Amino acid sequence: MNLLESMQMAGKTLLSNKLRTALTMLGIVIGNASVIAMIGIGEGGQRFVQQQLESLGPNVLFIIPGNQATQRISREVPKTLVYEDANAIATQVPTIADVTAELNSRQVVTYSNRNTDVNIIGTTPNFLIVRDFEVAQGRFFGDVDMKRSNQVAVLGGKLANRLFGNSNPVGQQLRIKNASFQVIGVLETKGSSLGVDYDDAALIPVFTMANRIVGRTSPYGLELSYIVASAKNADSVDAAVFQITNLLRQRHKLVGEDDFTIRTQKDALQTVGQISGALTIMLAAIAGISLFVGGIGIMNIMLVSVTERTQEIGLRKAIGATEQDILLQFIIESVIVSAIGGLVGTAVGVSGIMLVGAITPLEAAISPVAIMTAVGVSGGIGLFFGVVPARRAAKLDPIVALRSV
């Protein structure tokens, strides 16, 4: 019996037991769909985070108070960066194009009878350039507002909508910690960045923040939450890190470890890639368990099929079918079940990824490698788990098989 005849006979046998064949395929369908969907969602999440980081700009550096050891063991943020450090970086580091400083605090903002607890960010006029933001309405505060500690505020789009609804907030007065501020602008909606949602925040001049809201809490100057700098180009990022490190160590008179940490977009992308890659592998491995369970289901059903078809096997062997013919027949049946289940599971998995991409911010990431791997693995599982029943069928004694009728 040739391969084509074996495939035709296997197809007829499977179609004669449609419900059992469909239920056998179900485990493979679920396994393939889970693997493809989990890998796709993991890759989509990784791309989403990468886009968020890339939106900061390829040349952005974050200078954060405290080194990694102090950040791990201390609940309070170390007070090691001051405004004068930001000025020194801007004027003395040749590879830096622009610098902005940020001082953050959670405060209650009040307008009319509406109160909300939001992030108040004291910053500088260079914020728009360094952080790549645009003003949707009004203006951003300038150097004069900074020097005079003017009580002016620029709102994120989400906060402006929550406080003012459809009315124009520019020119309105609101209160932050019992101090009155005039709204002079609204930022374009951009989304959260590194855990800070600037769309739901109020930005004020950093000197106003220190003098009116939080006070000056560092004996060395105006304390900052962090400094953000942009290098002149991507090639100068490493040089900028080296120069900023040397400058701050000299300014802080350090002998041992640094009391600050410099993080670049490249560092963040590498960390995110490692974490999301590990999570994707873990999700795929968990989903792969269902493929294994589906393979066991195939073996179970094929063993039942061998028992039910003992007479058929005995009759075929009695009229000349070889052990290889019987072996091939049952292996083809199991491979067909697993292959068709793999294709259906692929369609379900891809549809799931498209659905997630349509209803969430995650980009639909369909990996051809994941699809080919899942279909190949499902076919391999059918072959592997079909061998035991096939060998059992091939080894049946035709006389014993015929007597069992």
Image (spheres, helix red, strand yellow):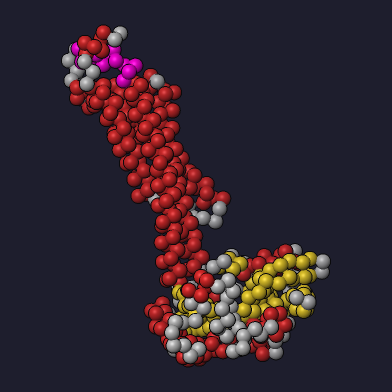
Taking the magenta stretch, the answer to whether it contains residue 5 is no
Q: Nearer the viewer, residue 235 or 75?
A: 75
Extreme residue in the right direction: 113
Magenta: main secondary structure equals: helix
Q: Nearer the viewer, residue 305 or 359?
A: 305
Residue at the location (44% across, 23% down)? 19
Q: Nearer the viewer, residue 300 or 128?
A: 300
Residue at the location (39% across, 30% down)? 297
In percent of width and height, residue 251 lies at: 50, 90
- Residue 80, by quadrant, is bottom right
Residue at the location (48% across, 43% down)? 351
In percent of width and height, residue 72 lies at: 51, 70
In percent of width and height, residue 319 lies at: 19, 12
Taking the magenta stretch, the answer to whether it contains residue 314 is yes
Vertical arrangement, residue 327 with respect to residue 216, above or below:
above
Q: Nearer the viewer, residue 316 or 156?
A: 316
- Residue 350, by quadrant, is top left
Q: Which residues are magenta?
A: 306-318
Vertical arrangement, residue 276 with respect to residue 57, above or below:
above
Question: Can residue 400 be seen from the camera position used here?
Answer: yes
Q: Quadrant of the N terminus?
A: top left
Vertical arrangement, residue 7 with respect to residue 219, above or below:
above
Question: Can residue 127 be seen from the camera position used here?
Answer: no
Q: Quadrant of the C terminus?
A: top left
Residue at the location (51% across, 65% down)? 52
In percent of width and height, residue 367 lies at: 39, 51
Q: Is residue 167 left or right of residue 221?
A: right
Q: Give the number of marks.
A: 0
Q: Is residue 107 left or right of residue 314?
A: right
